[in-house]
Image (cartoon, rainbow, N blue to C red):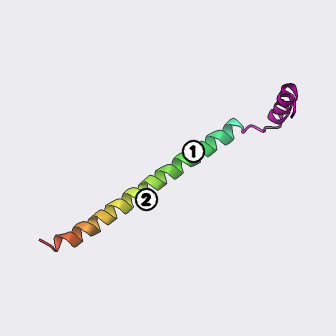
Amino acid sequence: MASAFEFIQNVRAEAAKVVWPTRRETVVTSLIVIAMAAAASLFFVLADESIRLVISFILSFGH
């Protein structure tokens, strides 16, 4: 088992290899995530309303 000092050295070495995204990359990917979430919510609202209308139409025959 490696010593705590070796472990910390290895953690620092691995952390130095991390490539952080630029501000532009972060903004672009955030906007894409927001747009996809909006598109998904719109899709599910439309699907839910469509199903509600179909079921309401079918149930209206019972009256």
- Figure quadrant of residue 42: bottom left
The outermost residue toward the left is 63
Q: Secondary structure at mark 2?
A: helix
The foreground one among 35 and 53 is: 53
Q: Residue at x 57, y 44 (%)?
A: 31
Q: Give percent across and percent down for residue 30.
A: 59, 43
The outermost residue toward the front is 1
Q: Residue at x 83, y 37 (%)?
A: 17
Q: Give percent across and percent down for residue 29.
A: 62, 45
- Marker count (numbered): 2
- What residue type is disc 1 on? Leu
Q: Quadrant of the C terminus?
A: bottom left
| Label 1, residues with CA under 10 Å away: few <14, some 14-19, many ≥20 | few
The foreground one among 55 and 28 is: 55
User: Which of the marked residues, 2 or 1, is nearer the chain's N terminus?
Assistant: 1
- Figure quadrant of residue 14: top right
Q: Which residue carries the number 2 mark?
A: 43
Q: Which residue carries the number 1 mark?
A: 31
The foreground one among 47 and 6 is: 6
Q: Residue at x 16, y 74 (%)?
A: 61
Label at residue 22: none
Q: Main secondary structure of the magenta part?
A: helix
Disc 2 versus disc 1: distance between alpha carbons?
A: 18 Å
- Dot 2 and dot 1 residues touching (CB under 8 Å): no
